[in-house]
Image (cartoon, helix red, strand yellow):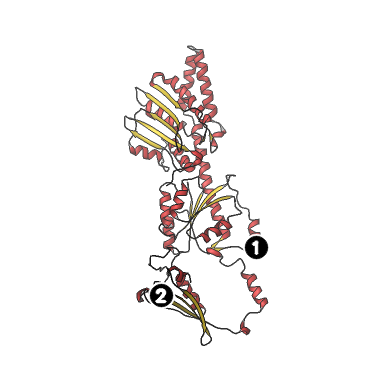
């Protein structure tokens, strides 16, 4: 019936049945596009689909193949008669049975009770029965690391699949957003922070494999886990899924309980990576460079004999720098802008007192900007500009800190007119897999921004022309689409 509807743009579809030699013969006929002999020869093969223009592009091309197997398992045969432009007639026969051979009512009930909830359910999902639910309730499931709602993006061109998936996960602490195409999913990726992407493999226009590859251009396997669902279970299909960048690959029919555990594992992975990045940033800030400590203390001692008031102000800035560097807020996801700027101001005040005219600081802050941003996101940029951009040159230079409103969010930019760097060095700083110690703070900041907003740092630099490093905190976490 589905095949007849798909290939009959207008006309008539009819279903008829007759009894012939103790067999039932069922016919489904249409007045659609029809088929030539060559097409008829392979339509019952798996993964074969018609090429006529009105095809909706959905499905795997398995329907007629499965139909043929079901008929033959019941001792029947399926045939097709068709001519191009004159429609098609599909016919199959099944053996008739007498009423005396039907199972007794109690046998039917027993069979129903045995199979209820254990057979493959709608849309390729296996929904566990009550006994399994009770058992699953007793299993100790590790809690999620974050108490907030988890955001899951699910994409499938079949709305039934999406509805079943949402139903299975309805008891979990997840916010589930659905998309009906890969392109729609790519657009939605730019609207919020996502913890997991669940994608069907076989979709028109862009497959789940292609979608995964595009997502991996912006997100690593730890920054956005991807779970692929598909009816294709050949080793080559699974290899393709993992080589495309998927974290996990589940073949249909999918056991609902197994699916829940796999999703929980991937989300826990994502949350643990987020936590590790935040702890890494806090650890890096707490590991204050010994030379910075010694030189600041020496400056305080020198000022004690020259200018007591200057010594007091430097001591206050140094105390603020140490206090904020060890603050527990640095391990959280977001802090107030004022908290971050207090650390930056303390640091720049200390460096300005130490290096005098070799370091100039320009602040350009719009009034009444109040926002939340990742902790220790501005400080590493400023410290990089001072240490590696300005003070690496004898003549010194200027650090320019700018915070300004834009249409899509708030721009935070740190510029210097220092020694600059080549593009290879920029790529190294932004590479999440870098092994060296230099630039870890920049790389860490970039990865945390990508985790939260989908976009990281923008670095523009030329040798001996200075460097500009910037990022945008989106309004209401509205990120740019991929």
Q: Is residue 108 visible?
A: yes
Left or right of 51? Residue 306 is right
Mark 2 or mark 1, which has the lower sequence index? 2
**x and y percentages locating residue 208 in the rendered image:** 44, 57
**Residue shown at the point (52%, 79%) measured from the top left:** 74
**x and y percentages locating residue 99 in the rendered image:** 62, 83
**Residue shown at the point (34%, 31%) measured from the top left:** 420
**x and y percentages locating residue 276 in the rendered image:** 51, 41
User: Which label belongs to residue 338?
Assistant: none
Residue extending furthest toward the right: 106
Residue extending furthest toward the bottom: 21
Residue extending furthest toward the top: 306
Q: Nearer the viewer, mark 2 or mark 1?
A: 2
Label 2 SS: loop
Looking at the image, residue 336 lies above or below residue 112 = above
Looking at the image, residue 107 lies above or below residue 447 = below
Q: Which residue is mark 2?
A: 87
Label 1 SS: helix
- Disc 2 + disc 1, Cβ < 8 Å: no
Left or right of 468? Residue 228 is right
| Mark 2 neighbour density, 10 Å: few (under 14) some (14–19) many (20 or more) | many
Quarter residue 52 falls in = bottom left
| Mark 1 neighbour density, 10 Å: few (under 14) some (14–19) many (20 or more) | few
**x and y percentages locating residue 181 in the rendered image:** 45, 56
Q: Which of the pair 5/24 is nearer the observer?
A: 5
Left or right of 262? Residue 446 is left
User: Which label belongs to residue 130?
Assistant: 1
The CA distance from mark 2 to mark 1 is 47 Å
Q: Is residue 391 visible?
A: no
């Amino acid at each position: 019936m589905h095949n007849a509807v798909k290939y009959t743009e207008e006309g008539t579809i009819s279903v008829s049945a007759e009894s012939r030699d103790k067999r039932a013969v069922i016919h489904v006929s249409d007045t659609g596009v029809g088929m030539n002999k060559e097409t008829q020869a392979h339509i019952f093969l798996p993964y074969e689909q018609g090429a006529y223009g009105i095809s909706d592009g959905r499905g795997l091309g398995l329907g007629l193949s499965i139909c043929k197997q079901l008929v033959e398992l019941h001792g029947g045969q399926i045939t097709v008669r068709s001519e191009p432009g004159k429609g098609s007639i599909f016919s199959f026969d099944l053996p008739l049975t007498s009423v005396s051979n039907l199972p007794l009512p109690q046998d039917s009930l027993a069979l129903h009770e045995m199979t209820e909830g254990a057979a493959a359910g709608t849309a390729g999902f296996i929904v566990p029965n009550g006994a399994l639910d009770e058992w699953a309730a007793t299993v100790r499931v590790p809690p999620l690391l974050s108490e907030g709602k988890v955001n899951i993006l699910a994409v499938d061109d079949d709305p039934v699949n999406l509805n079943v998936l949402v139903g299975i996960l309805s008891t979990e602490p997840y916010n589930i957003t659905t998309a009906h195409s890969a392109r729609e999913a790519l657009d939605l990726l730019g609207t919020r922070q996502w913890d997991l992407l669940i994608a069907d493999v076989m979709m028109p226009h862009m497959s789940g494999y292609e979608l995964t590859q595009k997502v991996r251009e912006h997100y690593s396997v730890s920054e956005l886990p991807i779970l692929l669902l598909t009816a294709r279970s050949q080793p080559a299909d699974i290899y393709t899924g993992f080589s495309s960048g998927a974290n996990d690959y589940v073949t249909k029919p999918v056991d609902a309980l197994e699916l829940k555990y796999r999703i929980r594992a991937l989300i826990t992975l994502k949350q643990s990576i987020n936590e590790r990045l935040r702890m890494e940033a806090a650890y890096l800030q707490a590991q204050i460079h010994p030379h910075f400590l010694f030189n600041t203390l020496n400056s305080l001692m020198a000022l004690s004999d020259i200018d007591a008031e200057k010594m007091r102000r430097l001591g206050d800035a140094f105390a603020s720098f140490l206090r904020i560097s060890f603050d527990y807020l640095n391990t959280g996801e977001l802090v107030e802008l004022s908290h971050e700027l207090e650390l930056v101001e303390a640091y720049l005040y200390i460096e300005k007192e130490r290096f005098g005219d070799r370091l100039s600081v320009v602040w350009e802050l719009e009034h009444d900007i109040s926002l939340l941003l990742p902790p220790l996101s501005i400080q590493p940029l400023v410290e990089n500009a001072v240490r590696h951009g300005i003070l690496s040159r004898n003549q010194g230079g200027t650090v320019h800190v700018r915070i300004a409103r834009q249409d899509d969010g708030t721009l935070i930019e740190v510029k210097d007119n220092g020694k600059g760097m080549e593009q290879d060095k920029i790529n190294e700083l932004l590479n999440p897999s870098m092994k060296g110690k230099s630039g870890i703070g920049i790389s860490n900041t970039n990865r945390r921004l990508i985790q939260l907003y989908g976009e990281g740092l923008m670095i523009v630099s030329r040798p001996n022309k200075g460097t500009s490093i910037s990022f945008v905190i989106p309004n209401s976490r509205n990120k740019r689409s991929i």
